[in-house]
Amino acid sequence: MEEVRIGVYVCWCGTNIAKMVDVEAVTQEVGKLPGVVIAKNYKYMCSDPGQDLIIKDIKGHQLNRIVVAACSPRIHELTFRNACEKAGINPYLFEMANIREQDSWVHTDRTEATGKALDLVVAAVHRVKHHQPLDKRSVNVDPATLILGGGIAGMTAALEIADAGKQVYLVEKSGHLGGHVVNFDLTFPHLSSARQMIQPVIRRVESHPMIELFLNSQIKNVNGYIGNFSTIVQNHAAEARELQFGNIIAAVGLKPFDPSVIEEYGYGKLPDVVTSLEFEKMAASGKIQTKSGREPRSIAVIHCVGSRNKKYHEYCSRTCCMAALKFVRQIHAALPDTFIFDIYADMRAFGKGHEEFYAETNDRKIIFLMFDQQEHLPVIRPADLKDDFNMLIGMDEKLSGEAIEVPVDMVILMVNMEAVDNVKEIVHAIGVSLCGNQFFIEKHPKLDPVATTTGGVYIVGTCQGPKDITDSVAQAKAAAARILATIAQVSVPVEVTTAMVDEDLCCGCQICIRVCPYKAISFLADKHVSFVNEILCKSCGTCGSACPAGAIVSKHFTDTQILSEIEGIMSMSVKT
């Protein structure tokens, strides 16, 4: 049996770890453990010099197991696996201990944090002794791409991929392209025409020889795995078509919040209370008028309608503040004698040129009023017959601390953006997850914001969360670049730490099939056992934990490996 020769490397992470953990003391103690040939610490293990240190020691000391104590494996596990591979050892003979997020960042006592760090590293050392080399696998990639959603994000991604000479199938559930942007009049902060921007994009998509467009259409369940997907596209006439493709982009967008549920605003009851999208159409027509057909003498714009409120949605819709300022500017230009009230909870002008846009708007004699979004919403009521205006807005003005009434002829509600109605059907079909706000979840919010945990499936635009046109386009181009890179590689690596079934133990109950979130398990009727498609499997461990017979084991997460890790962490606790 091969002698286990372990190298342990403890990272300072600048002061992120070293400020709370005595890394030198941890290194010294770990160096005494059986099987540990060398133990070192370095300020930044993930840096090139840090990786070179590991590579040099593997070759110089004939190391065959590596432990790095640093940050989360989600951030740099792949980095250190690649370093191991460069040095000539299997990347799965590596284990990472998280002593930053799970230790130094969550503790205030240096002694206790150091002790916990030692426990975590010792556990990793015990575990890595039982690691086994795993062979890499890859699959060929079909160069076609399926894109769900024909808004600005979906169209941008489609054109990027199609312009590279690759087939795109673009599926849009409505009868037209352009999403919500086709309803916009102007864009912020430059007040340029949205129509002049979006129409050329639509025409290019409609005429592109490498883009096949499916309007009034939706998909059924997607089958397969990265590089080799298939689905059925069906339109409103019950006409169906099977498609084969290698990657998927979800760009299904969001929909506007219905403000009629907020009684204070009277939407649907008061005729001159309109939503932001309704006002967009009004502004685009060139006629800003009340329902009675006269020019409003006073207009109020109310922010955060359905946003940042525990009763409706707690998140910020991000684009509402700037859209409100855009409306204010449009009204001021079209109706210079009209009083304009901007009623806001907080002003969030965080994008490029946005703060300047706010400052310029503020100089135009606009009346800004502030309200408390959580405590007291403004209340809109019809004005008395003797009043000159249609409505009165009663509110507790936060800046002055006074209760006031604002006379208006029109109110524009800046409505929240929320998930589309069939969002759960979509995520189930393509195998991704939703957060608590019903937005699609990305693989990593910082390091992988357009990919998902399902290989070959990408998310762009507002289905991931509210964002403006600029950010949507940037995400679309990023996802397209990722897909073109995988197509250029011809084949892509797939997960190897997958589940496997011991047919001698499997009782054929099929519980694993019902709980698998990736539809990776099927039933072999002739053998009366379950079978794992290792290409589809993501090694989440759900099947293994649910199997009553203990017949399913996840590679790289065997009982022996996990129990040895527990034994390691307990061994130090017993000593102390």
Image (spheres, rainbow, N blue to C red):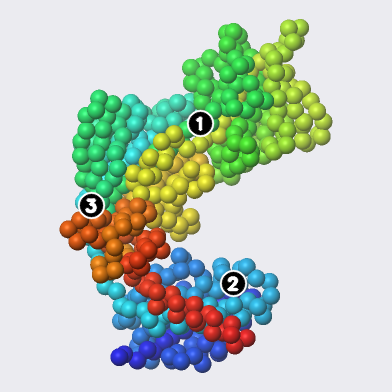
Label located before the other in sequence (2 or 3): 2
- The quadrant the C terminus occupies is bottom right
Which residue shows up at 55% across the image and 44% down it? 351
Location of residue 178 in the rendering, given as x and y in whole percent from the top left corner: 38, 31
How far apart are labels 2 and 3 at the CA level?
41 Å
Q: Which residue is mark 3?
A: 228
Q: Are marks 2 and 3 in contact (CB under 8 Å)?
A: no
Residue drawn at x 61%, y 32% is 305
Task: Give residue 17's quadrant in the image.
Answer: bottom right
Is residue 321 visible in the rendered image? The answer is no
How far across and how far down the image is residue 515, in percent?
37, 54
Dot 1 amino acid type: Pro
Q: Secondary structure at mark 2?
A: loop
Q: Which residue is mark 1?
A: 256
Q: Amino acid at mark 2?
A: Asp
**Badge 3, how many Cα within 10 Å: few under 14, some, many 20+?**
some
Residue 503: x percent and y percent? Answer: 25, 67
- In this rendering, position of residue 489 left or right of residue 482: left
Give how far across and how far down residue 110 sits, in percent.
67, 77
Q: Are marks 2 and 1 in contact (CB under 8 Å)?
A: no
Query: How much space separates mark 1 and mark 3, taking CA atoms?
Result: 35 Å
Which residue is more in the foreground, 323 or 220?
Answer: 220
C-alpha span from label 2 to label 1: 42 Å
Task: Give the label, 2 or 1, closer to the camera.
Answer: 2
Helix, strand or loop at disc 3? strand
Q: Residue furthest left?
A: 526
Instruction: Describe the element under mark 1 as helix, strand or loop.
Output: strand
The residue at the point 31 percent across, 58 percent down is 509
**Residue 103: image tag:** 2
Q: Is residue 24 left or right of residue 179?
A: right
